[in-house]
Amino acid sequence: MVERDAPERGLRTPVKIAVIFSVPMSTAKSFAWRWRAADYKQESTQSFSFYYECVANAERSGYKVELGRIEALSDLASVTKPA
């Protein structure tokens, strides 16, 4: 968890960070998006076809998504990775 300033209250409040990752879909040669807490304490309960839907769900659950941290946890990552 990261602490951010909350100037209106004069406090530092913890911010929960989420990481977006891809998962392979068993029904197609494609992938879906999921999110999990950076500390691994919570994970999305569903998969999303669109990245922005996944981000919105994480934010509704009280998490801040670090857009620079996208993880590829599927076989598709090895196909798209430069040699």
Image: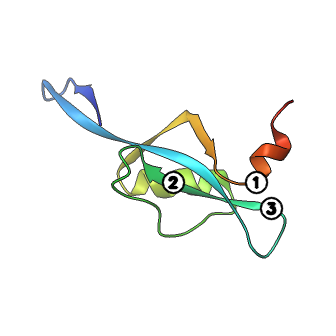
**Sequence order check, earlier mark of 1 and 2:** 2
**Residue at the disc numbered 2:** 35
Residue 6 rendering spot, x and y as whole percentages: 22, 28
**Which residue is painted at 26% across and 29% down in the image?**
3
Disc number for residue 75: 1
Q: Quadrant of residue 39?
A: top left
Residue 80 rendering spot, x and y as whole percentages: 83, 41
Indicate the amino acid at tag 2. Trp
User: Would you say 28 lies left or right of 16 here?
Assistant: right
Callout 1: few (<14), some (14-19), or many (20+) C-alpha neighbours within 10 Å?
few
Q: Quadrant of residue 11?
A: top left
Residue 1 rendering spot, x and y as whole percentages: 29, 37
Disc number for residue 30: 3
Q: What element carries label 2?
A: strand
**Sequence order check, earlier mark of 3 and 1:** 3
Number of the front mark, 3 or 1: 1
Numbered-mark total: 3
